Image (spheres, rainbow, N blue to C red):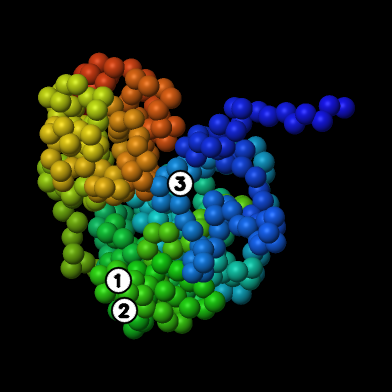
């Protein structure tokens, strides 16, 4: 047998390219090894690597999104072990935001923290208000599900929701209540419930370890450490999402009375807001342009037709096509949009870091091998002007059809 070591140049190239969708599949699973001088070497890129200060590293660059899709496809084939809690010793109640009817990345982190607090004896109870479209609750650590679909919980209804959560407190007495400390309603609902129950919650929690919760304070410059209270309002990346088990998601049948009294707050519906006035960090739908955009008038027209907030890469800002406050990336604004459409942006690492927390990324580019295409959930290869023009026409036709149906 030949002793020549055979090498796979393509596999080596994928291993070096952290943005490649197959990058995680070719990485070695070795976390630590003995170096030639007797020192223990550690792989800082390994999943769950603990840094020298004892903090678990969490990827914020979005470079592992491609490998996440590979893991998701593998999970679709490999059946994960089913975790069943028949008689839970206690409950950990989680009230996710469920923006758009789906679990956000913040919600998944919160469920990972709840799974950590529940251990093997407790059960994670998810309380969801209104309709939802989530189909992967079992892969995100939910043992029990309380789905409340009454019309009293539609829209902005914090009073009705707090009343039913108080009733749930009286029946189950969860060991912990977890809410996302977000602008989407979780922060307000958690604080309202804490005031109603007379609890003092821990806010902006970013870590729970060994019975101690750590939260940000002093405009993010200091940490507050305290024993884990009953109520926690957790920040994004407070824990690793559940990824190695499936859960039963058993429906919880409880007799909860929905109050019929007139609330002091009434939801008058959504108010139309000019997308150009929405701060980049708060925008949910962003149309961002880069060096590949040649017709900026058409780009602005597309943003207006879509009702999207405009963004730009650093190159477009430096060339004077967009103002500096519209720059997206590590050197500009970090965005958390639910949908981010990148037009003519190749995907520099600073830009990919800035969009790491976006839920869905759509890339329009002529180069099928650029890094933005590798990061994107949906890619359209072609001339940006032709694609934007076709998109404007499709949106106009859709709205005209909706107007005729309403008439």
Determine the secondary structure under disc 1: loop
Question: Which residue is at 64% across, 54% downward?
Answer: 31
Tags 2 and 1 touching, CB below 8 Å = no
**Mark 2 vs mark 1, CA separation in Å:** 30 Å
Q: Which residue is mark 1?
A: 221
Tags 2 and 3 touching, CB below 8 Å = no
- Is 39 placed above or below 309 here? below
x and y percentages locating residue 51 in the rendered image: 51, 63
Side of 201 relative to 255 (left or right):
left
Side of 334 relative to 121 (left or right):
left
Q: Which residue is mark 3?
A: 134
Quadrant in the picture for residue 152: bottom left
Mark 2 or 1 closer to N-term? 2
In this orientation, does residue 172 appear? no
Q: Which residue is mark 2?
A: 196
Q: How many marks?
A: 3
Quarter of the picture containing the N terminus is: top right
Side of 258 relative to 145 (left or right):
left
Determine the secondary structure under disc 3: loop
Viewer-side residue, 10 vs 301 = 10
Question: Which residue is at 23% across, 38% downward?
Answer: 314
Quarter of the picture containing the C terminus is: top left
Mark 1 or 3 closer to N-term? 3
**Mark 1 vs mark 3, CA separation in Å:** 36 Å
Q: Nearer the viewer, mark 1 or mark 3?
A: 1
- Is 40 placed above or below 332 here? below
- Is 395 placed above or below 260 here? above
Q: How dense is the environment of label 1, judged by Cα within 10 Å: few (below 14), some, or many (20 and up)?
A: few
Q: How dense is the environment of label 3, judged by Cα within 10 Å: few (below 14), some, or many (20 and up)?
A: few
x and y percentages locating residue 166 in the rendered image: 38, 74
Q: Nearer the viewer, mark 2 or mark 1?
A: 1
């Amino acid at each position: 047998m030949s002793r020549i070591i055979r090498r796979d140049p393509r596999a080596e190239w994928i291993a070096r390219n952290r943005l490649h969708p197959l990058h995680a599949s070719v990485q070695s699973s070795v976390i630590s090894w003995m170096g030639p001088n007797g020192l223990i070497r550690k792989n800082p890129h390994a999943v769950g690597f603990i840094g020298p200060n004892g903090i678990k590293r969490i990827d914020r660059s979005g470079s592992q999104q491609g490998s996440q899709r590979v893991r998701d496809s593998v999970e679709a084939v490999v059946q994960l072990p089913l975790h069943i809690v028949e008689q839970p010793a206690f409950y950990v109640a989680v009230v996710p935001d469920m923006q758009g009817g789906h679990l956000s990345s913040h919600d998944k982190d919160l469920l990972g923290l709840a799974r950590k607090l529940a251990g093997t004896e407790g059960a994670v109870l998810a309380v969801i208000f209104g309709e939802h479209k989530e189909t992967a609750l079992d892969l995100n650590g939910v043992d029990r599900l309380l789905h409340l679909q009454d019309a009293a919980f539609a829209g902005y209804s914090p009073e009705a929701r707090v009343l039913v959560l108080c009733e749930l407190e009286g029946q189950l007495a969860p060991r912990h209540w977890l809410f996302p400390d977000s602008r989407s309603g979780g922060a307000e609902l958690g604080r309202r419930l804490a005031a109603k129950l007379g609890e003092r919650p821990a806010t902006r929690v970013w870590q729970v370890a060994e019975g101690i919760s750590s939260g940000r304070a002093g405009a993010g410059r200091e940490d507050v450490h305290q024993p884990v209270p009953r109520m926690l309002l957790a920040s994004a990346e407070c824990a690793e999402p559940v990824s190695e088990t499936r859960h039963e998601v058993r429906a919880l049948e409880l007799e909860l009375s929905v109050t019929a009294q007139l609330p002091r707050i009434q939801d008058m519906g959504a108010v139309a807001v000019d997308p150009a006035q929405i701060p980049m960090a708060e925008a949910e739908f962003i149309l961002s342009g880069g060096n590949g955009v040649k017709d900026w008038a058409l780009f602005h027209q597309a943003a207006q037709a879509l009702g999207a907030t405009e963004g730009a890469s650093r190159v477009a800002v430096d060339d004077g096509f967009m103002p500096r406050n519209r720059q997206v990336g590590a050197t500009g604004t970090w965005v958390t949009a639910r949908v981010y459409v990148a037009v003519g942006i190749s995907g520099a690492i600073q830009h990919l870091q800035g969009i790491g927390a976006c839920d869905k990324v759509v890339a329009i580019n002529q180069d099928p091998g650029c890094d933005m295409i590798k990061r994107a959930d949906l890619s359209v290869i072609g001339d940006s002007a032709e694609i934007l023009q076709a998109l404007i026409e499709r949106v106009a036709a859709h709205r005209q059809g909706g107007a005729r149906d309403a008439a």
